[in-house]
Every structure is written in structure tokens, then in C-alpha cells.
Image (cartoon, helix red, strand yellow):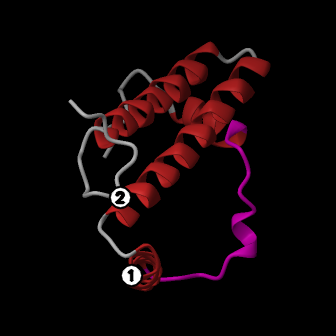
Amino acid sequence: MTATPDSISTAALQAMLADAPSNDVDSFPELTPEEMVNITRCELEKLQDAVGSMFAFKLAALECISMIKQFHDQGYENALDNDDRESAICWARDAGKAQGAMSCLKDIFCGPQDFICSDD
């Protein structure tokens, strides 16, 4: 969970939202949090069955975090294009957090199929 610093005004938050990359959210059905979790768990179970090990979750997590990082990288680029340095810094900070999460996850061994984890 990310806390919003006191130094960022409502107007600045609205500007960041306007600069955020579009994901065509309007094209998705309205789902409750419980429905979203259930769909996600169901798909992850299918993935684990297909891959055959816990390593499937690591691969999925890395791909998801990579997509989150790309989203924030694009937000950073958009903010720079709009000469909004404050927003760009926020987007870049969160992209860095995603990159850090990926680095940590890569070093967690998830069985013999894990071709990502270093031998250390």
C-alpha cells in the first residue's frame, strides 16, 4: 500500500491520473473484489496444473510485476512529455519498487524447474 505524501495536492493527483496510461478500463465488466480474486485464483491453478509445479506462480508473478513496471515506466514517460517533473518522479519511484520486487523474487528458489534463480 502506498501512502500519498502530504506534499502532493489533489490537483497534482488528478494530473497524474490524467497522465496515466489507458488500459481501456471501460471495456471490462464490473467485478466485486471477491470475484476478481476468485477469477485470478482459478487461472493461477490452471497455470500450475499446466506447468506442473510451484514454479508456475513465480513465472506468473514475474510477468505480472513486469507489466506493472511497464505501466509505471509509461506513466513516467507521459509525465516527462507533459513537463510534470513531480509526477515523473512518483512514477519512476514506483517503477523502481516493481523492479526491486522482481529482483527479490528472482532469488527465491521454486524447485528443479526454476531456471531463473541463481545458483548462489
Q: Nearer the viewer, residue 13 or 92?
A: 92
Quick one: label 1 or label 2, which is nearer the N terminus?
A: 1
Is residue 2 shown to the viewer in this render? no
Q: Nearer the viewer, residue 68 or 108?
A: 108
Position of residue 71 measured from the top left corner of the image (x, y, whole percent): 62, 42
Q: Which residues are magenta?
A: 19-32
What amino acid is at disc 1?
A: Glu
- Residue shown at 44% from the left, 85% from the top: 35
Residue 21: x percent and y percent?
Answer: 71, 44
Q: Residues within 10 Å of mark 1 (few under 14, many from 20)?
A: some
Looking at the image, is 18 positioned above or below residue 12? below
The kind of secondary structure the magenta stretch mainly shows is loop
Q: Residue at x 34, y 40 (%)?
A: 106
Q: Is residue 80 left or right of residue 38?
A: right
Residue at image mark 2? 113
Spatial separation of the CA atoms under disc 1 and disc 2: 17 Å
Q: Nearer the viewer, mark 1 or mark 2?
A: 2
Tell me: residue 14, above or below residue 110.
Answer: above
Amino acid found under the numbered disc labelled 2: Gln
Asked if residue 104 lies in the magenta stretch, the reply is: no
SS at mark 2?
loop
Kindly state the secondary structure of the residue where label 1 is placed: helix
The residue under the point 20% across, 30% down is 120
Q: Looking at this view, name the residue that lies furthest to the right.
A: 81
Residue matched to label 1: 45
Which of the labelled discs sits on residue 118, or is there none? none
Residue occupying image coordinates x 74% and y 14%: 83
Residue 75 in picture, x, y percent from top left: 65, 34
> On the image, which quarter does residue 3 sit in?
top left
Is residue 103 found left or right of 72 in the rendered image?
left
Front residue of 66/28: it is 66
